[in-house]
Image (tube, helix red, strand yellow):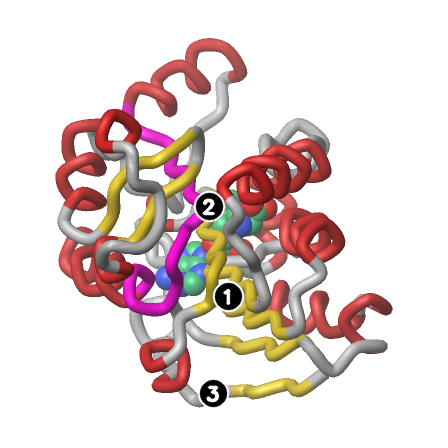
Amino acid sequence: MKSLLKKTIIGTGKNGKKFDSEYWKEIYGSGLDVDGSYNAKQHAAYLHALFQLMEIPVYKIADFGFGKGILLREFTKAFAPVKVYAVDASEDAFFELQKKDWVKKSDKYHVFHSSLEDFKLAKLEKEPVELGICNSVIQYLPDSVLPEVMEKLAKYCNYLYFTVPTKSDYDEMRKEMQFVDPYAFERSQKYYRKLVSRDFEVVGYNLLQSKWLGEKGFKEEFFRI
Ligand SMILES: C[S@@+](CC[C@H](N)C(=O)[O-])C[C@H]1O[C@@H](n2cnc3c(N)ncnc32)[C@H](O)[C@@H]1O
């Protein structure tokens, strides 16, 4: 495992707070009720089966905002990539991931402590990973940086396993679970669709295909939204 501590401006939430122990305790909680954590194995199995069907090989994975690394671990198990890049703005998340046995014992992991805004890796632009993960992260980034960050992700990976909660999702969580996330920006589905459509096409549930991939990838027009 190579650990790369980059001196950088670290991303904070809408409330100006860092993603430190308070965030993990008050907002994220145990993770047992969070989609992508309790069912991480099923997410990985779903995408692995879809990629097998589409005959898309995966040699490298990057997780943009890996958090507790639960989804990353399951994706790594399912796809067995030779290289894994993982970046997160949270210092707690950065140190915790490096303590994990499955990370420590392998030299395929390259873990970065950086905001997505500041994260730059020239070799990824030259040679993008086949699969990126950005699960429930960009709601924490301000409007001003989003187009640039999405373009970067589209250049750094061919496919992106992606989710973001919209304003209406937050309304639902407020109503159903009295859950409020003061770190997050609440934006409409229309806003995110427009943002994402500059650099990606939606080709499946939770799955974006980079427009920078050119003519390769999912061909059937009907499934490219
Ligand atoms: C809700 S958690 C999701 C974690 C993980 N992707 C998952 O699915 O379990 C949000 C993560 O985004 C990270 N994050 C927030 N803003 C960020 C930024 N600007 N750059 C990089 N990571 C950021 C947080 O530190 C946290 O780890």
Indicate the quadrant where residue 17 lies: bottom left
Tell me the residue that label 3 is attached to. 6
The residue under the point 34% across, 81% down is 126
Tell me the residue that label 2 is attached to. 161
Q: Which residues are magenta?
A: 153-167
Q: Is residue 164 above or below residue 104?
A: above
Say which label, 1 or 3, has the lower sequence index: 3
Residue 197: give x, y in percent of width and height.
Answer: 17, 43
Residue 154: give x, y in percent of width and height.
Answer: 29, 60
Q: Residues within 10 Å of mark 1 (few under 14, many from 20)?
A: many
The residue under the point 71% across, 55% down is 73
In the image, the residue with mark 3 has its CB under 8 Å from the nearest atom of ligand 1: no
Tell me the residue that label 1 is attached to. 88
Residue 158 shown in magenta = yes
Location of the N terminus (image quadrant): bottom right
Q: Amino acid at mark 2?
A: Tyr
